[in-house]
Image (spheres, rainbow, N blue to C red):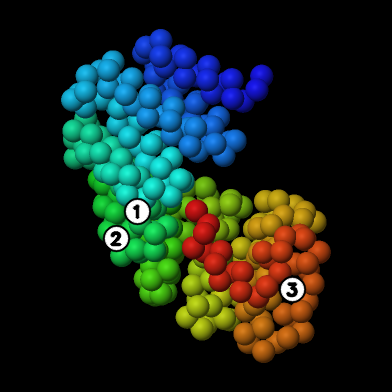
Amino acid sequence: MNRHYKCTGVSMVIHQHIPDIATSLHNLWTMCQEEGEYRKAVSYLDEALWMTKRIYGPHTAHHDIALSFDILSTAYFNLGDYKRAMAYCEQALQMFKTIYGSSHPRIATTLKNLGHFWSDLGDYGKAISYYEQALQMQRTIYGQCTSHPHIATTLKILGMAWSDLGDYGKAISFYEQALQMYRSIYGEGTPHCDIATSLNNLGSAWSSLGDDRKAIIYCEEALQMKKSIYGQGTAHPDIAKSLNNLGSAWHNLGDYRKAISYGEQQNTRTSDAQCCGWDCCRREAPISE
């Protein structure tokens, strides 16, 4: 069936006042997003928001209405309408607070979404403010000393935001907390992508501080873990990036033979042009979430 008709079909379901409107809305958004048809998705989502208000009441605080605000904020952000995206996200946040009170996982997620928006717009200070609110709420929900994937991810994101601000010391502090928590969750010796990413982020931060020898320790551990996850001989972009990171660190230390060796290994792993320069590893930490 053509994807357009699938989207239209979901829209018709919404028109029929099906109670499970939030699920239908999610399906519609997912289908249109996969096709990159953001404007069409927004038109459907606007219509769906109107429908949810009509079903539950225009002034009613309801999860489905708040979810519509939340999804619309992402849709408008993808279209470059940042002002409207922020407005919808703020409405979602306020409605979730009305529904669930001062502390709830959905509220924490919306706070993180606002942080993501501000981070993408380059205002890392505001992003950090929202991330810290989300972190505090998650610790209240799950426990101050509890190891939880949501908390670990927020710690990692805070590390990336501080790295973008150029405060690599704070970035390292958050990366180390994230790494410790991921190891507690998955197991100390368990190969896992979240652990490998945290190791790589630490390597990137130490390299940015000028300590390339310490960066090599973390990047080498990340490389071995990625090989364990994806396979020793697998041509995977994550492995290629780690090889590139190590090549960059050895290059900075003046050991050009080792740098070339890692560069040659990296080139055999992938033809991805983004992984061909020494500088690509510098940006892996901020974009890996």
What's the mark number on residue 262? Answer: 3
Residue depth check, mark 1 versus mark 3: number of the one nearer the observer:
1
Quadrant of the rendered structure where residue 159 is?
A: bottom left
Query: What residue is drawn where x is 35% and y is 37%?
Result: 70
Up/down of 138 relative to 169, above or below:
above
In this view, the residue in front, 178 or 260, is 260
In this view, the residue in front, 272 or 228, is 272
**Which residue is tagged 2?**
126
Residue 102 position in % (x across, y down)? 19, 40
Residue 128 position in % (x across, y down)? 32, 60
Residues at discs 2 and 1 in contact (Cβ within 8 Å) = yes
Element assignment for label 1: helix
Residue 135 position in % (x across, y down)? 31, 52
Query: What residue is drawn where x is 29% and y is 54%?
Result: 130
Number of marks drawn:
3
Q: CA distance from mark 2 to mark 3?
A: 38 Å
**Which residue is tagged 1?**
115
Element assignment for label 3: helix
